[in-house]
Amino acid sequence: MYLTKRELRELIIDTKEIVIRPLLQIDQIGEVAVDFRLGTDFLMSFQGRNSAIDVSNHDAPEPSSSYFQETRRLVGSSFLFHPMQTVLCSTLEYIKLPKNISIELTMRSSYSRLGLSISSFIQPGYSGCISMELTNVNNIPVKISVGARIVQARFYRLAEDTDYFSTKRKYICQVRPEVSLANLDSEGDILKKVKNLGI
Amino acid sequence: MHFRTLELNVAQLSRCIQKSRINKYSDARKEKYQKVLIELFSELQTHDYSTLTPTQLIAKKQIVDFVFESIQYLDNSTLTIIPFEIVYCLEQALNEWIPGHSFIVVTSLSNELLSYQISYNLTQNSALYTLIKNDYNKEFEHKLIQITLPRYYVHDYLANVVLYHELGHFIDRTYKISESVIWTEIANKTVVYNSEEMYRLLNHYMEYFADIFAAQYVGNASNLFIDYIAHKNPDCFTHPATDKRIEMVKKFLDGDHTVPEIKNLKHFTLLNTGRDLEIKHDNLPLDDFYNLLPYELSNERELHSIFLAGWSAWQKNPDNKLKTDFGNDVAYKAINNLIEKSISNYIVVKNWNS
Amino acid sequence: MYFAQNETRNQFELYLTFLDEIVANNNELYKAFFRTIVSQAKDLSTGVIDYSKLSKEHFDIIAILANNHPDFFANIDIDNITVENYQQILTFLTADVSQFAY
């Protein structure tokens, strides 16, 4: 069930069960969603010497991080999204969710109309800035202000509590985007074994 | 020095200038500084060095060196991964001790593991700026200070506390605090001018000042790291023994100012700067760290306090919740991330509301 | 370190250059530059001021000159510093710099 404005305000402002730091303006809390802002750190992909980012291979010679370049901007300055470029960024806000509330993240329509897209789901119990993979699917570059409200989060209440830390987490207390650690997924070895069985 | 060697140096500088000319800065002060620098260089290029006396050649070399060093500082400052959180904290301390200053702080990342430094060469030689004004009618409204930290520790706020110590050296040199102590000893005939003992004593005083200066803001956090990297180092010409340094900071933090070194440094700090060496931090509760939350810092005192809080969260033994729940690697990352986010949130909120 | 630090050594090199210029060409700009130095060296030598009151920009040279040549500076006429005075200061400073231990 989506949380509405009244419930969101209660959980964020009154009881602080949902933590958002900083919440620069109260009106970021809308009728059925909370707006989040573009943060200051970016990871931009670039083409290296290898043909692909290989996350199927635990022992890949080049880690994923070698395909991304880090950059920072101050709040109020701008960032340029090139056509068909995927940029890793994060929200300006650091959030902490209770054990029974999750988030679904989408672009605010003002920005999706420009060709920017995102789809993200944040699990209950998550603590950190929200990582975003923004892609400009337009054929025109788009320049956005750092600190602008670009995404909106719908909050769901689950039927029961979950334990975010019941499994080992790769991303904890993120405050800037981090490259994929998909090649460290625990099933990597199993999949390798299955492949070698020739089935 | 042969004038042709100086002309070679100018030709070398020409290549650097060509590369740096295209640099763009978001900071208007850096743009202006670069503009004056390029104008100065144009004058240097057209100068006839063959007619200069040896003394004049040495003076001109200083100007060429100045341009080289300025370009180096500015070039490095276009880095787009500047850790502006730690720079911001240092700038607040700098603003407090030298209000209304005209310094531009730039940063540089080093590949060396422990290269923490604040380079202030360009701020110390006032005669050089007089020479530039006299010979070329160029004036620099601002002076550059460069903060260098190791590339690998860009996001390591536990280690970066060392920069407060480096800032302490800059404040000391600017206000001649340790030097005032030593010259008073010379005047009282307890130390002989120009003796090895004088230099050794001056060096030691400078280190004590820098340690105490840092301790004002970050408590004993800076010493925790120094104790690790310089553990049990004995007295030497340039530094007091590590144990003595730690003890000095402890006495300062405990309010025991009867030790001669602390007494002398406090005395001349107050006389030379109008400010006192005193505790400028609080002991923040560690709950936010344990709850994986960035702090909501409300003032500058709390801002500086975050570093000591980070160290306290790391050092806590036994019952270190972060270590128990997540292990050392995650605890290290979490503490540093939360310090960074606490500082950046403070900056954003302050600027948003201003 | 103190005098071994480049910026201090560099500054003293320029002080010598300026004094050279004053002696050779009566350079008014450098004379104005040196006025504070000479004036404070005199005040320090005669006990009018102490080290905390010295110009921070020229602290080093003032302290060294006053310490090493107190009689000269105590007796100098600040309102009428002659070229011979500057020549003497140049001689003093050249000797002082050459004796820096570190």
Image (cartoon, rainbow, N blue to C red):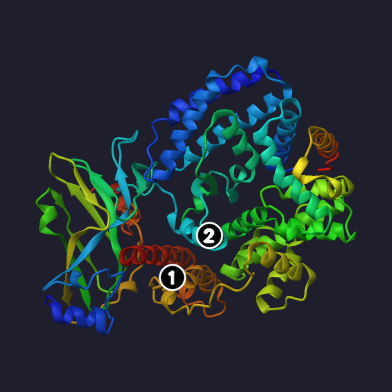
Q: Quadrant of residue A166?
A: bottom left
Task: Decide which of A178, A113 is in the foreground and name it.
Answer: A113
The residue depicted at 51 percent of the width and 27 percent of the height is: B41
Q: Residues within 10 Å of mark 1 (few under 14, many from 20)?
A: some
Q: Position of residue B303 (x, y in %)?
A: 47, 69
Look at mark 1 in the image and give the residue it sits on.
B326
Please tell me whether mark 2 sits on a helix, a strand or a loop.
loop
Identify the amino acid type marked 1. Phe
Q: Position of residue B312 (x, y in %)?
A: 54, 73
- Mark 2 / mark 1, whichever is N-terminal: 2
Q: Position of residue A153 (x, y in %)?
A: 18, 67
Residue B38 seen: yes
Against B19, is B168 above or below? below
Q: Position of residue B259 (x, y in %)?
A: 78, 73
**Mark nearer the viewer, 2 or 1:** 2
The residue depicted at 55 percent of the width and 32 percent of the height is: B68
The residue depicted at 42 percent of the width and 65 percent of the height is: B343
Q: Quadrant of residue A61?
A: top left
Look at mark 2 in the image and give the residue it sits on.
B99
Against B205, is A159 above or below? below
Against A40, is A128 above or below? below
Marks 2/1: CA–CA distance:
43 Å
Q: Quadrant of residue B44?
A: top right
Identify the image quadrant of the N terminus of chain A.
bottom left
